[in-house]
Image (cartoon, helix red, strand yellow):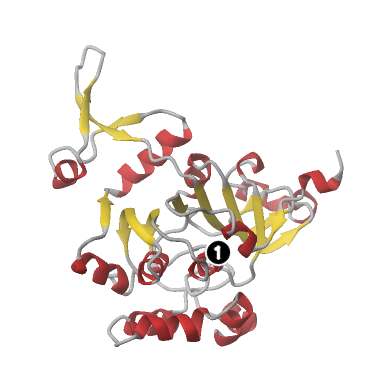
Amino acid sequence: MTTKTFDKRTSAEAVIGKLRDGMTIGIGGWGPRRKPMALVRALLRSDLKDLTIVTYGGPEVGMLLAAGKVRKVIYGFVSLDAIPLEPYFRKAREAGGLEVLELDEGMLQWGLKAAALRLPFLPTRVGLGTDVFEQGGFKTVASPYDDGEVLLAMPAIPLDFALIHVHRADRMGNSQALGPDTYYDDWFAKAAKEVAISAEEVVDRLDHSYPEDAKANLFERCFVQHVVEAPGGAHPTSMPPAYGWDMAALKAYAASAAEEGGWDRYRDEKVGPDEAHYLAQAGGIEAISRLPFPIF
């Protein structure tokens, strides 16, 4: 085998070029934390539409809705954390017409796990006796054992594609996520037919460059088909220990939702024609790397 055989490095634009209208896209991260925003911005610049987005949602959901890319959202929540209600998501929900499946956080995780295990569903007690059960159209299953307990049958949530941001990756698709919480990115990767990871840094081999962080590899490289180097790629969301969230940028984004033509201005001035423009208007990598970590 040649080195090239194992080289999965590509560009964000090439990744987005593999997506098709109507696909179900899983987006890793958690609210305003470690979102694959460089890949999301490439998606915003595309002509794609009618997507189903599966996520523990943050600004990516509102942006994709504002840009007219989304038909349905499957989510455990959609929030900017310090700004509790994601403003463009709220506008879309209040306007009606958006198809949604609102889930308990654990139900979403269970749906991804079922897809990863190639099972049609997984049983759970979560959601029983709630409006989530009624509005989601869920069904129950009885335990075949002596207990006979009736459980909610959480259906699998298979993904056509997953987008995930990590701290480091190598050309073969190995990755390292160094933060204190890795969320459920491993299940997004395993539930998807195809996975693209963006990374703050891409090296030839992680086992040579950063062997001390081998345990930070969340999922095997066999699940990864595409690797994109994207310094600052989570901005304006947080990326500990590399940088915190950019609350000033998130507040400006949120404020645009209340302005006439606010999204068009935000898209033109902030997202811009390419990632170089985006990073420049954010102050560059140096400014992003100095963003303080939120304290809870």
- 55 and 93: which one is in front? 93
- Among all residues in the image, which is located at the extreme right? 2
x, y percent for residue 16: 57, 59
Q: Is residue 184 visible?
A: yes
Left or right? Give the position of 270 relative to 206.
Answer: left
Q: Is residue 183 visible?
A: no
Left or right? Give the position of 183 relative to 13.
Answer: left
x, y percent for residue 193: 53, 41
Q: Residue 99's image quarter?
A: bottom left
The answer to whether residue 263 is above or below residue 220 is below
- Among all residues in the image, which is located at the extreme top? 146
Check disc 1 and report the residue beneath it: 39
x, y percent for residue 127: 21, 41
Q: Residue 252's image quarter?
A: bottom left
Quarter of the image that includes the N terminus = top right
Name the secondary structure under disc 1.
Answer: helix
Q: What amino acid type is highlighted by mark number 1?
A: Leu
x, y percent for residue 107: 31, 42
- The residue drawn where x is 46% and y is 58% is 29
